[in-house]
Amino acid sequence: MLIAPSILSADFGQLKNDLEQVKKAGADLLHIDIMDGQFVPNISLGIPVMEAINTYSDLPKDVHLMINKPENFIKKFIELGADYVTVHPESTNQLEYCLELIKTNGAKAGIALNPETGLDVVLPYLHEIDLLLFMTINPGFGGQKFIHSVVDKMYEANSYREFHELTDLLFEVDGGINEQTAKICLENKIDILVSGSTIFGSNDKKRIIQNLRNPY
Ligand code: DX5
Ligand code: ZN
């Protein structure tokens, strides 16, 4: 599995250092959470911080937009270095247009599903996206507990991916990842694990990243 540290749990007073540390520790990509205080009950980081991340890290950037009307900001985040942009169908009534914007501006397109949102909402889009993100917490804050009922949705999505031979479609999990829940994700053929508090809360980031990647 690929490991994407979530910058939300970084120390913003020494962001450059944290970015260097996770790269040295073996991170595959950076997960960047953008929140607007509307779609989710929290505000995280915005454009100036995204600029700094782009300046100080050359790791691929996975931008998770938790904002209403993401269509208004997709182009900007791609200009600022986003390689993947993930949008929530719960946050826009222009999902198809969002995916189109992401792709025409040269990034890879992802859809994120809240724990309560069913897979049926995204089935019509699975053939045209690069990434499906399963939220295993209610979005807004790091440090919450993994919601186990989402595993049924992963199972369902795996059957769909196999049956339709969507071999390039990646599955990502975000929320409550630790060594135990990483194991559940591996068993459910997840390709990318996002982890904020577990990675940034550890003094041995290299070891924790290795353990999340191979949780046995
Ligand atoms: C929350 C964010 C997550 C968050 C995960 O809405 O989408 O990426 O940083 O944090 P942990 O790994 O601590 O659950
Ligand atoms: Zn996220």
Image (cartoon, rainbow, N blue to C red):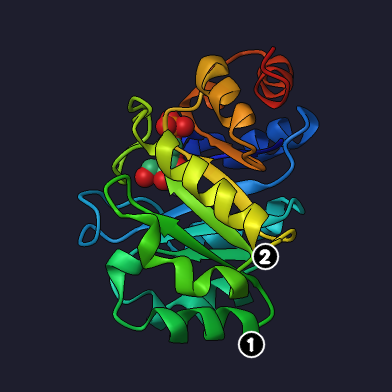
Q: State how far apart marks 1 and 2 are (Cα).
A: 12 Å
- Residue drawn 57% across the image and 24% down it: 182
Specify few, some or many for label 1: CA neighbours under 10 Å numbering under 14, 14-19, or 20 or more. Answer: few
Residue that mark 2 sits on: 83
Q: Amino acid at mark 1?
A: Thr
Residue 166: assigned label? none
Compared to residue 139, the image places residue 104 above or below, namely below
- Residue 116: give x, y in percent of width and height: 26, 48
Binning the other alpha carbons within 10 Å of mark 2 as few (below 14), some (14 to 19) or many (20 upward) gives: many
Element type at mark 2: loop
Q: How many marks can you see?
A: 2
Q: Is residue 89 left or right of residue 3?
A: left
Residue closer to the observer: 98 or 203: 98
* Quarter of the image that includes the C terminus: top right
**Quadrant housing residue 214:** top right
- Can I make out residue 32 in this image? no
Tell me the kind of residue under disc 2: Asp
Quadrant where the N terminus sits is top right
Left or right of 91? Residue 17 is: right
Q: Earlier in the sequence, mark 1 or mark 2?
A: 2
Residue 169, picture quadrant: bottom right
Coordinates of residue 75 in the picture (x, y in percent): 53, 81
Asked whether residue 107 is in view, the answer is: yes
Q: Position of residue 79 (x, y in %)?
A: 62, 77
Dot 1 falls on a residue whose secondary structure is helix
Determine contact: label 1, label 2, CB under 8 Å.
no
Image quadrant assignment for residue 66: bottom left
Residue, disc 1: 104
Name the residue: 78% across, 32% down: 26
Q: Is residue 216 above or below residue 44?
A: above
Mark 1 within 8 Å of ligand 2, using the beta carbon:
no
